[in-house]
Amino acid sequence: MITKDKVIEVLGNLQDPFLHKSLVELNAIEDISIKEEKNHVSVKVAIAKTGTPEQMQLQTMIVDGLKSAGATTVGIRFSELPEETLAQFGVATENTTNLLNNNKTTFIAIASGKGGVGKSTVSVNLAIALARLGKKVGLIDADIYGFSVPDMMGITKRPVIRGERIIPVERKGVSVISMGFFVEDNSPVIWRGPMLGKMLNNFFTEVEWGELDYLLLDLPPGTGDVALDVHSMLPSCKEIIVTTPHPTAAFVAARAGAMAIKTDHQVIGVIENMSYFESKVTGEKEYVFGKGGGEKLSEELQAPLLGQLPLQQPDWDDEDFAPSVYQDDHRLGKIYLDIAQKVVELA
């Protein structure tokens, strides 16, 4: 059975990831609770900065350490160290250099009303198409519960941390940051809304993006916490709404568009994905998901229909594997390039 003394011993061996001082030295262990019948340990730990990738790494170390010491399950709450403690170690409490203060970058959020319409595929390929036009492009996988961008782009590296700045991973000419980089073994994210908002804010303020022409955000589907955070953080953000031709998908997507309009975000266009399937044998088009959803949504939002994407797999290259990326000479790659040209003109 694990004891409080053992918990303190385990945590005492760990350091605050920013101050590089032990948790005991910082008096950062604020609470320890043990449920003996379940062998469950709950701890509350204060650190210099919450909602960061470093917090995720520390969280993993705490869980692994306590389980190795005998705990069956572990619960962790994080808080921030008091300002006087931070000042004692010479840490500034505000970060004055961040992308949110940069008026040279155009922010474009890719949104949808529901999941399964290919929003992330659109985000990835539109970002790459903009890069092929010679633009400096960043991509935030802001779908924090359903992150998929690293796998779609065939990214196997992780960001490195230089000082207190995160260096994004570059792939296909696009700088990428994703929650997927900071989660081990495809673990589920169980944070609540406020913590997710802090993580998203750190994607803007803690990442060394450099000079960007465009920063694309792959939003979660719907109008939940993360989408609300984006709307409040980025008052001048443009939006593209993704739908399928199905009337229900277009109906639900209209909510995401309405939310953008109500928060003074400009909807610059609609993209209809999975528009049809064309047989290689007969050349006949089959409208698997119906017709008209994109046009209807475009009319409702008074925004142009930027493109209609048929159902077709990318050509896979085993030597440079990126399973959801269309090559520039692929039929869909050319459509994405045309959409990118329109986005440059509209944004």
Image (cartoon, rainbow, N blue to C red):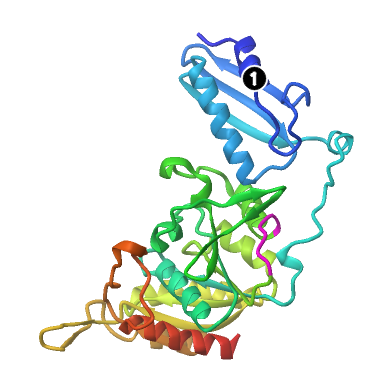
How many circles with numbers are drawn on the protein? 1
Residue 206 lies in the magenta stretch: yes
User: Viewed as shown, does residue 100 lie left or right of 108?
Assistant: right
Q: Is residue 119 above or below residue 151?
A: below
Which residue is under mark 1?
Answer: 32
Q: Residue at x 74, y 76 (%)?
A: 103
The location of residue 140, given as percent across then percent down, is 56, 63
Image-based side of 164 in relation to 242, left or right: right
| Residue extent of the magenta highlight | 205-210
Q: Quadrant of residue 330?
A: bottom left
Q: Nearer the viewer, residue 10 or 29?
A: 10
Identify the image quadrant of residue 169: bottom right
Is 97 on the left-hand or right-hand side of 145?
A: right
Toward the viewer: 98 or 300? 98
Instruction: Classify 10 Å Cα crowding around label 1: few (below 14), some (14-19), many (20 and above).
Output: some
* Residue 309 against residue 15 in the figure, above or below: below
Which quadrant of the rendered structure holds the C terminus? bottom right
Residue 29: image location, x then y, percent:
71, 24
Could one spot residue 112 in this view of the protein?
A: no
Q: Is residue 300 visible?
A: yes
Three-letter code, disc 1: Ile
User: For the point 63% across and 33% down, which residue is it?
Assistant: 77
Picture residue at 65% right of the left edge, 64% below the top? 209
Q: Main secondary structure of the magenta part?
A: loop
- Determine whether 323 is above or below 147 in the image: below
Residue 174 pos. (x, y %): 53, 69
Whether the magenta-drawn stretch holds residue 192 is answered as no
Q: Is residue 68 left or right of residue 259?
A: left
Q: Nearer the viewer, residue 129 or 78?
A: 129
Q: Can you name the residue that lies furthest to the left here?
A: 281
